[in-house]
Image (cartoon, rainbow, N blue to C red):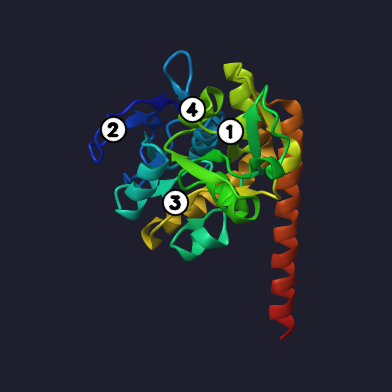
Amino acid sequence: MRKQLSFVLAAAMLAGCMAVPVMADEAEDGKVWVVATDTVFKPFEYTDDNGDFVGIDVDLLAAIAEDQGFEYELNSLGWDSAIAACQAGQADGMIAGASITDERKESGWTFSDGYYNATQSMTVAADSEITGFADLDGLTVGVKTGTQGATYAESLQEEYGFEITYYEDSPTMYQAVLGGQVVACFEDTPIMAASIQDGDLALTILYDTENEGSPYGFAIFSEDSQELLDMFNAGLANIVENGTYAEIIAEYLGEDAAATAEASMLADGEAETEVETEAETEAVTE
C-alpha cells in the first residue's frame, strides 16, 4: 500500500536547515534516518514556486524509502554543510547530485550504485566570443566549491592559463557570468541546461567542452549507515525495474532523457548481475 507523507519538525542539529516530508509509517525499530542535501541544484533539488522542496533526488529518495519501508528526514543544508553534517555524524547520508569519484572514495565517502550519469561542461554568456578553452588565457572562470565542475576546471587551469573564482551556490555563479565578473563557469551539464531553460538565462552551454562525466551516487561517511546504503541500492534497483525511476526522470528532464537514463541504469544492472554470476560460478568450481 502506498505510504502517505507527513511532515515532521526538523531536528535542530543545524540552524537554518529546511526539513521536508518523511515516510509516516513507523519502521520496526523506530529509526528515522537523517539525510542531508543541497539547497539549489535544479533539477535535482530546489524549491518550486509553491515553496515546496522538490527535484529528482527528492523524489528518488521518497520512492526508494517507500519501496524499502524506511523512515527518513531530509534536511536542505547546502553542499558544504551537507558534507560537514555527514562527517560530523549529524546526518546519516547525503543525496545531492554527488559524483562518484575515486578521490572522494579515498577521502572517506562510501557511495551507492550510480543513479544518474552526468557530464560537466563550460557555459558562457549568450553573447560571448569565447568558443572553447583556448580563449580563456588570462581570464577568470567561476566554479561551485567542492563540485566536479570545480575539479574539471582545476584540471584544465594550468594548460589554458585561466584563473578560478569559487562560489557557494550555482545561482550566484550564473549571475557572475551574466554580470561579467567571470567569463564562464563549469557545472554539471543537466543542471546547467535546466537552469538556463527554467530561468530564461542568457547563457550558452558549449557542449563540445563536455568531459566523460561520472554517475551520481547516494553517499555515507560511516559504517553505521551501511544499512541505509544497502536499502538505497535495493530500492533503486526495484524502482528502475518497475518504471518509477523513468517516470521521475521524465518529469524533470523529459521523456528522451528518461529513456536514455533508464537504458543506462538497466545496462549497468545487467552488467553487475553478469559479474556476480561469474563470481559465483568461479567460487563453486574452485
Reply above or below: 128 against 73. Answer: above
Looking at the rendering, which quadrant does residue 177 occupy?
top right
Looking at the rendering, which quadrant does residue 166 occupy?
top left
Q: Can residue 162 be seen in this snapshot?
A: yes
Pick whichever of labels 3 and 4 is earlier in the sequence.
Answer: 4
Nearer mark to the viewer, of 2 and 1: 1
- The answer to whether the residue labelled 1 contacts the one labelled 3, judged by CB atoms less than 8 Å apart, is no
Q: Which residue is mark 2?
A: 10
**Percent x, y of residue 228:** 44, 51
Q: Which residue is mark 3?
A: 228
Q: Secondary structure at mark 3?
A: helix
Pick whichever of labels 1 and 3 is earlier in the sequence.
Answer: 1
* The C terminus: image quadrant: bottom right
Pick whichever of labels 2 and 3 is earlier in the sequence.
Answer: 2
Q: Residue at x 67, y 37 (%)?
A: 242
In 3D space, how far apart are the residues under numbered discs 3 and 4 (Cα atoms)? 31 Å
Nearer mark to the viewer, of 4 and 1: 1
Q: Which residue is mark 1?
A: 183
In 3D space, how far apart are the residues under numbered discs 2 and 4 (Cα atoms)? 25 Å
For the residue marked with disc 1, what is the amino acid? Val
The residue nearer to you, when weighing 156 against 284, is 156
- The answer to whether the residue labelled 2 contacts the one labelled 3, judged by CB atoms less than 8 Å apart, is no
Query: As drawn, which residue projects farthest toward the bottom?
Result: 286
For the residue marked with disc 2, what is the amino acid? Ala
- Label 1 crowding class (10 Å Cα cut-off): few <14, some 14-19, many 20+? many
Q: Which residue is mark 4?
A: 171
Q: Residue at x 52, y 55 (%)?
A: 111
Pick whichever of labels 2 and 4 is earlier in the sequence.
Answer: 2
In 3D space, how far apart are the residues under numbered discs 2 and 1 (Cα atoms)? 40 Å
Pick whichever of labels 2 and 1 is earlier in the sequence.
Answer: 2
Q: Residue at x 39, y 41 (%)?
A: 36
